[in-house]
């Protein structure tokens, strides 16, 4: 990357992958990707190769989140460098295969962009997930998507916390982008969620085509929700859950949670209040897939990020 009068010149994005089925029971991405595998016309753009791809086919076949272990946590250096392929869990084997096909992770040969499509049971609406606050290409792209979707909203979750960041399927790419759309039950397809995801991908690919054609994007600011802390359910000494998400918090993703607000409701009717020092913005509230991860929701703080103007670097 080079800079001229605050314009950052970035490499053209020539190869894009769209992953569905990283979790085999999140139906919107699976159905969209399978549709695009049959007919790529909708995702074709000039100067761009776009590959739709089912990441975890065995889990998709069984309509389950995963077979042995969560594929979206499997892209660690240890897993990707493991040599005993046959003795590895299925998703670790699959991570190695994906890394070879679309990476290697961290290399100049890696795909430019990977969109990883997910559904959530939480009331998050349309949410784009970024893994870096300094990726100018992604910041400009999500700004473009948000403007294109107006007046409909699209929240931006920044997962850059060193302790909570995990080794995602999309992290193989130079510019990884996650997409969560909900609420939608596991193993269920809802038309409004399907169409919202489809629309976001259209705008994203339009942005990449414009960028590759030489369009310069001016400086912009984007509001993100930066991940702070993972909150577990209250538990007893045997790790059994003793309380539920409070009805005043349920379905209130992205809304402020202030000190003294209801957070959990015990089975005997006692309210547990939020006692944090500052206002937070919870999300992934009561996500079904996160019970096994001992997570009731994650807290975030609101933040404004600034991105330089960008254009394609010309050789």
Image (cartoon, rainbow, N blue to C red):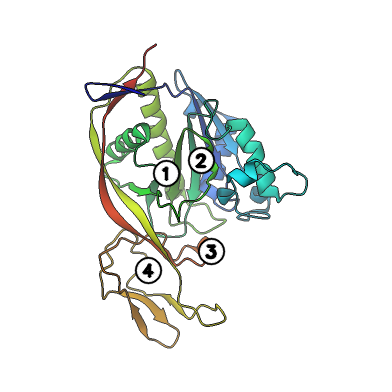
Q: Rate crowding at label 4 as few (under 14), some (14 to 19) or many (20 or more) other CA atoms within 10 Å.
A: some
Which of the two residues, 285 or 315, is positioned nearer the viewer here?
Answer: 315
Of the two numbered discs 1 and 3 on the same chain, state the one appearing first in sequence. Answer: 1
Residue 58 % position (x, y): 69, 48
User: SS class of the residue under badge 4?
Assistant: loop
Of the two numbered discs 1 and 4 on the same chain, state the one appearing first in sequence. Answer: 1
Disc 4: which residue: 250
Of the two numbered discs 2 and 4 on the same chain, state the one appearing first in sequence. Answer: 2
Which of the two residues, 62 or 164, is positioned nearer the viewer here?
Answer: 164
Q: Rate crowding at label 3 as few (under 14), some (14 to 19) or many (20 or more) other CA atoms within 10 Å.
A: few
Q: Rate crowding at label 2 as few (under 14), some (14 to 19) or many (20 or more) other CA atoms within 10 Å.
A: many
- Tell me what residue is drawn at x 54 percent, y 82 percent: 237
| Whether residue 90 is situated above or below residue 241 in the rendered picture | above
For the N terminus, the image quarter is: top left
Residue 114 % position (x, y): 49, 35
Disc 1: which residue: 131
User: SS class of the residue under badge 3?
Assistant: loop
Disc 2: which residue: 171
Q: Do callouts 1 and 2 mark residues in contact (Cβ within 8 Å)?
A: yes
Disc 3: which residue: 293
User: How far apart are the alpha carbons under marks 1 and 2?
Assistant: 8 Å
Of the two numbered discs 1 and 2 on the same chain, state the one appearing first in sequence. Answer: 1
Q: Do callouts 2 and 3 mark residues in contact (Cβ within 8 Å)?
A: no
- Tell me what residue is drawn at x 39 percent, y 42 percent: 132
Q: For residue 131, which quarter of the picture?
A: top left
Q: For residue 308, which quarter of the picture?
A: top left
């Amino acid at each position: 990357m080079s800079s001229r009068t605050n314009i950052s010149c970035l490499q053209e994005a020539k190869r894009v992958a769209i992953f569905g089925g990283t979790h085999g029971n999140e139906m919107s991405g699976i159905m969209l990707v399978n549709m695009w595998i049959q007919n790529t016309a909708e995702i074709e753009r000039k100067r761009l190769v776009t590959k739709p791809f089912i990441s975890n086919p065995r889990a998709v076949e069984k309509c389950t989140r995963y077979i042995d272990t969560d594929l979206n946590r499997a892209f660690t250096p240890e897993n990707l460098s493991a040599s005993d392929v046959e003795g590895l869990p299925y998703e670790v084997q699959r991570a190695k295969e994906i890394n070879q096909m679309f990476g290697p992770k961290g290399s100049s040969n890696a795909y430019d962009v990977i969109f990883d499509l997910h559904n959530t049971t939480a009331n998050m609406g349309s949410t784009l997930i970024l893994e870096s606050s300094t990726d100018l290409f992604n910041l400009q792209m999500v700004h473009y998507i948000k403007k294109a979707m107006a007046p409909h909203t699209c929240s931006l979750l920044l997962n850059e916390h060193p302790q909570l960041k995990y080794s995602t399927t999309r992290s193989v790419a130079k510019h990884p982008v996650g997409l969560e759309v909900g609420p939608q039950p596991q193993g269920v397809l809802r038309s409004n969620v399907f169409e919202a995801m489809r629309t976001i991908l259209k705008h994203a690919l339009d942005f990449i085509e414009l960028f590759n054609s030489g369009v310069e994007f001016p400086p912009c600011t984007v509001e993100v929700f930066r991940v702070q802390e993972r909150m577990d359910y209250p538990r007893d000494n045997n790790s059994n859950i003793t309380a539920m998400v409070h009805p005043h918090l349920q379905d209130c993703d992205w809304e402020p949670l202030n000190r003294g607000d209801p957070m959990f409701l015990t089975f005997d009717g006692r309210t547990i209040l939020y006692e944090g020092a500052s206002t937070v913005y919870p999300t992934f509230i009561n996500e079904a897939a996160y019970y096994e991860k001992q997570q009731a929701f994650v807290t975030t703080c609101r933040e404004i990020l600034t991105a330089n103007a960008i254009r394609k670097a010309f050789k």
